[in-house]
Amino acid sequence: MYIVVLFAVIMVMVMYKQLANRRQQAGIRGWVKSQDLDGKGSRVYRDRRTGISAKPDVVESGRVIEFKSAAVEHKPRRSDVMQVAAEMIATGQSEGELRYGNNKRFRFQKSEAGTKSVMKDVVRIAELMRWHLLKGKAPKAMPARRKCAKCAFLNDCPDAVR
C-alpha cells in the first residue's frame, strides 16, 4: 500500500516538473484562463462598450498572447498589433504579446502611448463598421491592384482594379 502511494507521489512530482518546464519554455507567466491555439476553442471575449469580440490564442491573468507563423525582422506588422489591441480591449487585459514564427516577441502595455493610440484606432474602426452596418451603406472602396488581385469579390466589385 505504501509503495503505491509513494509511486503516485513520485509520478505527480515528475509530471509537475515537466509541466513547469513546458510553461517556462512557452513563456507562460500566469494562470491560463483560455487558449485557442488549435482553433477549436469556444470562448469568445466581448467588450460590451465597444462591441469588439475576439478569440485570442492564449489569455492569461492580465495578458493576451497572439502567435503568428509569419517571420518579421525588426517590428511587428501593424495589422497584428491592431489584432492584439482588439484582443486586449475585448478581454480587458492590460498587457499583450505578439510572438512570431522566428521567435521574435513584441510586448504591449495598455498604459503605453503607442498602445493607447492603436487601441483608439481599433475602437474608431469598430464604430465606423457599426455605423456602416446600421446604415446599410458600404464604405468607400480603396482599390489597389495587389489588394484586388487577392480579393474573393474581384469579379463582382465595380471598383476593382484589374
Image (tube, rainbow, N blue to C red):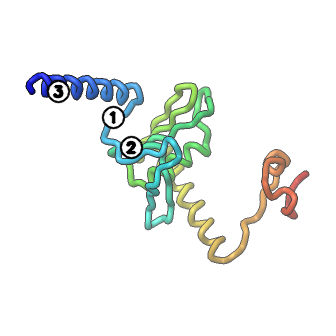
**Furthest residue to the bottom?**
135
Q: Quick one: label 2, few (<14), some, or many (20+) residues within 10 Å?
A: many
Name the spot of residue 155 as percent of width and height, x first: 87, 59
Residue on which the image places disc 1:
29
Task: Answer with left or right where residue 6 lies relative to residue 98.
Answer: left
Task: Answer with left or right where residue 134 lies relative to residue 46.
Answer: right
Q: Which mark is residue 9?
A: 3
Under mark 1, the amino acid is Arg
Name the spot of residue 21 as percent of width and height, x first: 34, 24
Q: Earlier in the sequence, mark 1 or mark 2?
A: 1
Residue shown at the point (55%, 32%) measured from the top left = 100
Residue shown at the point (62%, 65%) measured from the top left = 129
Q: Nearer the viewer, mark 2 or mark 3?
A: 3
Residue on which the image places disc 2:
63
Disc 2 and disc 3: Cα gap in Å?
33 Å
SS class, disc 2: strand
Under mark 2, the amino acid is Arg
Q: Earlier in the sequence, mark 1 or mark 3?
A: 3
Disc 1 and disc 3: Cα gap in Å?
25 Å
- Labels 1 & 2 near each other (Cβ < 8 A): yes
Residue shown at the point (59%, 34%) measured from the top left = 69
Disc 1 and disc 2: Cα gap in Å?
9 Å
Task: Answer with left or right where residue 88 lies relative to residue 142.
Answer: left
- Labels 1 & 3 near each other (Cβ < 8 A): no
